Amino acid sequence: MTEKTTPRPGRRRTVELLMLLAAITVFVIGFSLAGLGVNGSVPPVLALFTGVLGGGAIAVHIALRYLAPWADPLMLPLGVLLNGIGLVVIWGLHAEAGRDGSGALKQLMWTGLGLALCLAVLVVVRRPQLLQRYPYLMALAGVLLIASPMLPVVGLDQYGARRWLSFGTITVQPSEFAKLPLVVFLAAYLGVKRDVLALAAKQVMVREVKVFSLPRMRDMGPMTAAWGMAILVLVGTKDLGTSLLLFGLFLAMFYIATQRKSWVGIGLAMFLAGAYAAYLIFWHVQQRVAIWLAPFDPEVYRQQGGSYQVVEGLFALADGGLLGIGFGAGRAATLFASDSDLILVSIGEKFGLAGLSAVILAILLLVERGFRVALASRELFVKLMTAGLAFLWAFQVFVVLGGVTLLIPLTGMTTPLLAIGGSSLTTSWIIIGLWLRVGDTARRPAQAVTGEPGETVEISLNDGRLTAVRPSTSAIDQM
């Protein structure tokens, strides 16, 4: 019996290690320059930050060599690069503002936890397709997490929105964690109902030319339920950003599963109708729209909660120019939420258009690798789940960047891996862990062993095992 040889994945991991070292080097140089710009010396905590970020990244890399050797080699270095840039900017902003280093140290703690969770995903989730076993339990978990800020005791209302849970000095944003079970539920549900939703529709014709497809009313239940949940989130928590993100995710996954543009059109029409009703009812939505339409109006600029934050953010981006002004100068450190909602503004001021463009390209490259993994996946559920997570990441960055540049109304939302906050950071690393696991499962080649006619042979495919009996050679084969 002869064994068929398969290519070894060692080269992927070697490339990954080299890029990891490059990402850690960029972090060390950036952190040193931030300290020199603010205090005139290298920060004394540089070794601590490098040890946690670099040590955690190397630990995940070593685990990948044994647990997921065929995983994408670009994802971990890109994640470490973005996480490192976020740490540099957060530390620099806090040092400029004269704050203590507790905020940056807390973000470093979340970084270590996020890398540990990424490693845990690789260990625990050996077969991603098994996540579809409990779709409705996942849906219930997601809904409960989104609704939890409405609880009377631990729910925290800040800045016109109720989207946090407060436990003493620790605050958690449960909507960040809710995205994961909701994506799993949608992937499982659409994987089962895909054919019905894609094929059962009434065609609207104009002179024998199809212009639109209307789904059957009984198939509108999922769309109506998603629309109702988005509106309830908007009403209950006053969180326009989360409402927009969740409904956008639902429409994107619907389109990926069915490839029917009519579902997107109907969904957008329903959301716009609900958003207009919310605009008529809630003052904070009216305020966000007024800021978007007339940010430089003196009345809008000076009123409490007005356009001051957005306008000053635009000026900070302009101050950054092409190459940035570095740390120790500028206005970004004085802006509210410069390390969270406006983190991209801070990056633009400190590193300029070139630096901000490089950061956005790194994010887009990470999203592209996520979609590439989805295309390589064999199971429909895994395809939908991976693509949904990639779209979620891309759409979240679009909402943040569009808000700070006034392309769309500003909504409070974090940028993955960059903004301060443990909920967003740990969720982002969990998503990267899932991408790495799915990529390994999708790209691992089939290992087949051939045998003599009639001999039982074993074929190893991905993480499953298949036993087959090779048929005897026929008379035709013997001729």
Image: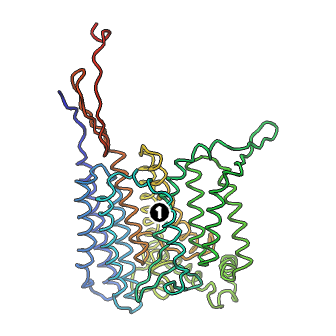
Q: Residues within 10 Å of mark 1 (few under 14, many from 20)?
A: many
Residue under label 1 = 181
Q: In this rendering, is residue 202 above or below 275?
A: above
Q: Residue at x 22, y 59 (%)?
A: 62
Residue 415: where, in percent of width, then height? 47, 71
Considering the numbered disc 1 on the image, is that residue within a helix, a strand or a loop?
helix
Q: In this rendering, is residue 450 above or below 117?
A: above
Q: How is colour applied across the structure in the image? A: rainbow
The quarter of the rendered structure image containing the N terminus is top left
Q: Residue at x 33, y 73 (%)?
A: 111
Towards the viewer: 444 or 198? 198
Towards the viewer: 454 or 356? 454
Q: Residue at x 70, y 68 (%)?
A: 274
Residue 89: where, in percent of width, then height? 39, 78
Q: Residue at x 21, y 22 (%)?
A: 452
Q: In this rendering, is residue 372 above or below 118?
A: above
**Residue kind at label 1, given as amino acid type:** Pro
The quarter of the rendered structure image containing the C terminus is top left
**On the image, which quarter does residue 200 sit in?**
top right
Q: Is residue 142 left or right of residue 8?
A: right
